[in-house]
Image (cartoon, helix red, strand yellow):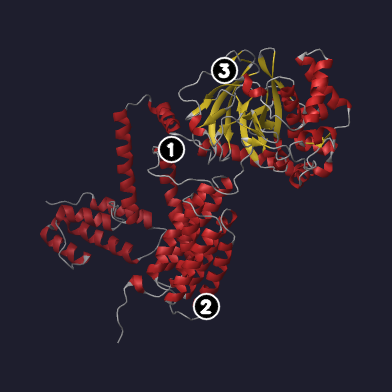
Amino acid sequence: MNHYVPPMQRALMLPTLKVLMLVQWVVVLPFLRYLPVWLGGVLALVMVWRWRVMHGDMRPAPLWLKVVSVSVGVAGLFASGLTSYTLDSAVALCLLGYLLKSLEVLRRRDAIFQIYLGFFLTGVYLLYHYSPLGALTAIAMLLANTLALHAVTADRSFEWRRGLKYSLGLLGSAIPIMVIGFLFFPRLPPLWTIPNDQRGAKTGMTDELTPGNVANLARDNSPAFRVRFDGERPPRSQWYWRGSTLGAFDGQSWRAFYNEQNRRQWPRGRLPEPTGVGDRYDYTVIIEASQQHWLYFLDWPTSVQADNARILPDGRAARQESLNQAYRYRASSSTRVDWSGENALDWYRALPNSGNDRLRAWARQRYDAVGGDETAFVDAVLDTIRSEPFFYTLQPPLYQGNNSISDFWFGDRRGFCSHYASALGFMARAVGIPSRLVGGYLGGVYNPNGDFVQVRQMEAHVWVELWLNDRWVRVDPTAAVAPNRVELNLDDWLGEENPSELPMGSRVRRGLSMFNQAGLWWDSMQYQWQVLVLNYQDDSAMGLVESHLGRINPWQAAGFMAAFLVVLGVIMAWLTGLLRLPRRLPEPWASLRRLEKRLGEREPGETVRHYTRRKAQEYPDQAEALMSVTTLIENMAYNQDQHSKKSTETRLRHLVQPIKKT
């Protein structure tokens, strides 16, 4: 005797199990770039279990296997360092549950639950990679889960062609709603947040510098930020992008006075912004996620338009929140600013009591030789770099200990920008000149396709600021050892001076113009994506509406939103079958319906011929016309000749038109 099995309890068929296995690959693989690699091993073990089920072993996993799997998985998360409540730990735990759910997916109910979790992970993936390529990946994940949902809920055996047709149709019908929602639905703040300190994010310049660590960034070709100027671009030699101001020196490393550790001690309230006294440049910056707090500016910043951002007394700008996603802000800079409010010069003269003694003595000798003239002393140091065998390289020796700067200056003399900046900053303090290092970027690549400057991580650079003639003056010792570096990007300079140190990606782009043009095109597309999609705000939506409808008040906006929701509800009701719109009857039934309205309804089960005969007896003067109508209706109902269909319909309407009660 056959028993009825509820739909949600029915076992999955073999084609459906194959689709679920494929969908798990599509959902999990994009996350392995950001999460522990051993989750890929869990995916492989799950595939083995799926294979076992597909070959007839439909027994559910025993309880001990589930308990061991969950325990080992959670222990693996802790062993991978995911011990705090962060985005990585939350997503890794969710992904682990998604994989282990496969141990019990044998029936429709469990499969649907796993698919819904796959939809959730699709949205989560965009937190990691919200770019054009990330959007395409998310669309593929969305299509795969929709296809799996169709396979699980299909009443008959799954067919790929029909499944793809229905899935694409369902997603396609959602596109208009998605576009309208994106354009006009307000961006609401989150009700709760998860700390997003995703591992592997490019941090760029930090608030601590040890000579040599900047060289690691010089091998990274990924973008740091993109800049579009409102008007004319400044000269290429002025593309110094200020980030971190490093004023504290302990003998080996330079640190920022205002850093992550003492963020609660940063100045409160609105600080006075520097006054620009030189040429002014206005521009827009889109900075990539760095997990840091500071923003980058063309040297020197005079104003910033960003949420919870301010220009600190040390000449850099920072936000209270860390940059855990791409961020857009407006800024202004001047070639010179008024430093009349500077009152912390003693901080920038401080040196440890010991260490690098030989270099201290050398600096004081040079200072005395020029009669204590600070500007002449700086020129003398730069002349030494130009005239003696100093070398600019990405692969300097490792200088360690309290005499590391002296070892560089009097030893191998091979260093990167941070070595030369650290040496000049130390020597300036040794003779009483206030100095500080600035970490940022030098140069950039102008993209004519999008009219913006892209600054890459490999343009990371360090220079010195000296207090000369009652103002901070930028002095870049790199210009003394490698003059062309100021006018050229680092990869262009290495290509001419030291090709062996050029990163592989830069070699390919320099060697093949096709790859270079493709790279510029891709960079331009990413920039437009960030401008038009990532940074689309509520005021952009209001501007779009007001440009067509004029100025609107809050009541009009509320009415518009209510109307939109009503229209959206009607569309969804129509798509789901809850609402059926009236349809026009085709001929000959439309003419028959008009005839019934005039002469009376047909009896239940009454044929057309029997109906017209009965009405002919009631209205003898209409008998001939009714018989002609009957003949045409029967011909149209049973004769499928498409060539005469239109003319027959016209004749039928003309015959019915004069018939009425007499």
Which dot, 3 or 2, sits closer to the camera? 3
Query: Looking at this rendering, what residue extends furthest in the bottom direction?
Result: 1
- Tell me which amino acid carries mark 1: Leu
Question: Relative to residue 397, is residue 541 depicted above or below?
Answer: above
Residue 600 relative to residue 265: left or right: left
Q: Residue 155: x percent and y percent?
A: 38, 70
Q: Residue 441: x percent and y percent?
A: 68, 32
Q: Which mark is residue 274?
A: 3
Among the two numbered marks 1 and 3 on one chain, the one whose residue lies closer to the N terminus: 1
Question: Relative to residue 656, is residue 11 depicted above or below?
Answer: below
User: Dot 1: within a 10 Å radius of its alpha carbon, few (fewer than 14), some, or many (20 or more) residues?
Assistant: some
Instruction: State how far apart marks 3 and 2 are (Cα).
Output: 70 Å
Residue 622 relative to residue 352: left or right: left
User: Dot 3: within a 10 Å radius of its alpha carbon, few (fewer than 14), some, or many (20 or more) residues?
Assistant: many
Q: Quadrant of residue 476?
A: top right
The residue that label 1 is drawn on is: 183
Can residue 412 be seen here? The reply is yes
Q: Residue 456: x percent and y percent?
A: 67, 37
Question: Relative to residue 2, is residue 386 depicted above or below?
Answer: above
Q: Which mark is residue 475?
A: none
- The residue shown at (66%, 15%) is 471
- The kind of secondary structure element at disc 3 is loop
The residue that label 2 is drawn on is: 52
- Tell me which amino acid carries mark 3: Pro
- The kind of secondary structure element at disc 1 is helix
Query: Looking at this rendering, what residue extends furthest in the front direction?
Result: 353
- Tell me which amino acid carries mark 2: Arg
Among the two numbered marks 3 and 2 on one chain, the one whose residue lies closer to the N terminus: 2
